[in-house]
């Protein structure tokens, strides 16, 4: 992955309702063909994350979360350190993403910075198709990802893709 400065990781499963938000955002970002940005899908398994984020300046993880009470479509930006101590209720992948960082540190396979953009879900039940509020949030999440990438000087200017 020579020349890759950032990675966008869409965590989730498009066959589990709103859990498809991570893959949907990843697909939209990939279509922008941003130089220096790798885009990948992941099921949240720690070992899979280590391979995609090792040695990049910035890793952005996009995932769906269940909250009580929930406001489906609400977007949260956090860092992995802020998730420490959060119980399993946060995400269907809550143990995979936070556990991957200490494992990566032990193996020397970590990004310079790790940002999590989470979208509150209405449901993570089996089924294709996101709820209306989560589907409507996809473009806002893409904008949030682009804002993070802009901190590295990576922008859509001069790129063939469109939002």
Image (cartoon, rainbow, N blue to C red):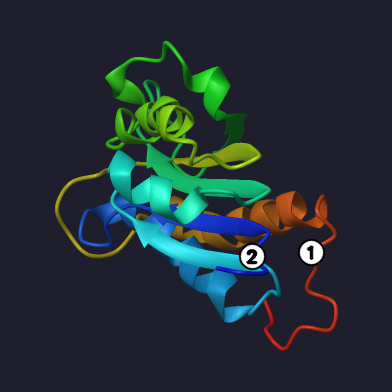
Q: Mark 2 points at which residue?
A: 4
Give residue 157's quadrant in the image.
bottom right
Is residue 102 placed above or below 35 in the rendered structure? Answer: above
Q: Distance between the residues labelled 1 and 2?
A: 11 Å
Q: What residue lies at 65% left-to-right and 54% top-to-bottom?
A: 145
Marks 1 and 2: CB-CB under 8 Å? Answer: no
| Residue 44 visible in the shown view | no
Is residue 18 placed above or below 69 in the rendered structure? Answer: below
| 10 Å crowding of disc 1: few (<14), some (14-19), many (20+) | some
Q: Nearer the viewer, residue 6 or 95?
A: 6
Which mark, residue 154? 1
Q: Which of 124 and 92 is in front in this view?
A: 92
Disc 2 element: loop
Q: Quadrant for the N terminus, please.
A: bottom right
Looking at the rendered image, the disc whose residue lies closer to the viewer, 1 or 2, is 2
Instruction: Residue at the far top: name it.
Output: 85
């Amino acid at each position: 992955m020579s020349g890759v400065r950032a990675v966008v990781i869409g965590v989730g499963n498009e066959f589990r309702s709103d859990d498809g938000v991570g893959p949907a955002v990843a697909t939209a970002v990939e279509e922008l063909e941003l130089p220096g940005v790798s885009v990948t899908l992941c099921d949240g398994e720690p070992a899979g994350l280590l391979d995609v984020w090792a040695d990049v300046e910035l890793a952005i993880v996009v995932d769906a979360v269940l909250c009580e009470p929930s406001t489906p479509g609400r977007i949260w930006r956090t860092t992995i350190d802020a998730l420490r101590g959060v119980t399993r209720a946060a995400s269907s992948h809550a143990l995979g993403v936070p556990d991957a960082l200490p494992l990566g540190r032990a193996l020397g396979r970590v990004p310079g910075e790790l940002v999590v953009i989470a979208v509150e879900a209405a449901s993570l039940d089996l089924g294709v198709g996101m709820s209306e509020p989560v589907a409507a949030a996809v473009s806002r999440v893409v904008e949030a990802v682009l804002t993070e990438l802009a901190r590295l000087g990576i922008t859509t200017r001069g790129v063939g893709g469109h939002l």
